[in-house]
Amino acid sequence: AQSVTQLGSHVSVSEGALVLLRCNYSSSVPPYLFWYVQYPNQGLQLLLKYTTGATLVKGINGFEAEFKKSETSFHLTKPSAHMSDAAEYFCAVSPGYSSASKIIFGSGTRLSIRP
Amino acid sequence: EPEVTQTPSHQVTQMGQEVILRCVPISNHLYFYWYRQILGQKVEFLVSFYNNEISEKSEIFDDQFSVERPDGSNFTLKIRSTKLEDSAMYFCASSETGANEKLFFGSGTQLSVL
């Protein structure tokens, strides 16, 4: 079975500051890991995903995440926050095979950006 | 970019009534999903659908729930007899090649059961 835990339901940073959103996963098989973002009144959009290979994954809008198997973590970072980054961010996991029929989401972290 | 569209955006119903939530997935997608999010809680998987049948369903997806792709373009979620605890935001998603590829989500239907 797979699950993810997102630490912190709400994170607030100043514009230009580092963004760090934390995600830990649990999986009985090698996982695929995802970050999705939800802007107000919109559906979830894929930011980035880790499947195999390089553990540092780059996504859209300057975000990146690093898969650390030893820490069972997949934290999302961005060096410099922008006001447009304010949104809800969801970490997700699935079993790492092509026939997987679902991904499992965390409870989300709301990111606020202070001017 | 193509979009998944969901209607209605808000649905209010009385407990015990049937509701149908509608979704139009992206036209060349083959995999379809329903998720829901109760306020303040996780986005929960309900059901996945491929090749005109359910691929996987969660414990939440009991006999009160059903899905259908009636006409090759729409994908519907029916709740036969709504309960108060069914109040949630319901998201439809679709994918071209499966869950491990990019899921495209609709903007959701907020269901309120009174």
Image: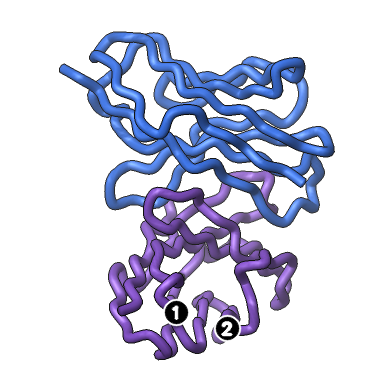
Chain colours: A blue, B purple
In the image, taking residue B70 as reference, residue A21 lies left or right, namely left
Is the C terminus of chain A in the top left, top right, bottom left or bottom right quadrant? top left
Image spot of residue B23 (x, y percent): 45, 71
At horizontal 27% and vertical 10% (from top left) the residue drawn is: A16
At horizontal 68% and vertical 45% (from top left) the residue drawn is: B100
Q: Which of marks 1 and 2 is nearer the N terminus?
A: 2
Mark 1 chain: B
The reply to the same-chain question for discs 1 and 2 is: yes
Q: Mark 1 points at which residue?
A: B83
Q: In which quarter of the image is residue B86?
A: bottom left
Q: Which of B39 and A115 is in front in this view?
A: B39
Residue B69 appears in view: no
Q: Which of B39 and B74 is in front in this view?
A: B39
Q: Nearer the viewer, mark 1 or mark 2?
A: 1
Image spot of residue A37 (x, y percent): 43, 38
Mark 2 chain: B
In the image, taking residue B47 as reference, residue A81 lies left or right, namely left
Separation of residues labelled 1 and 2 (CA atoms)? 10 Å
Mark 1 is on which residue type? Lys
Extreme-left residue of the structure: A115
Mark 2 is on which residue type? Gln
Whether label 1 touches label 2, CB < 8 Å:
yes
A41 over A23 or under it: above or below? below
Q: Mark 2 points at which residue?
A: B64
Residue A10 appears in view: yes
At horizontal 50% and vertical 82% (from top left) the residue drawn is: B79
B97 over A5 or under it: above or below? below
- Label tally: 2
Disc number at residue B61? none
Crowding near the residue tagged with mark 1, few <14, some 14–19, many ≥20 C-alpha atoms within 10 Å: some
Crowding near the residue tagged with mark 2, few <14, some 14–19, many ≥20 C-alpha atoms within 10 Å: few
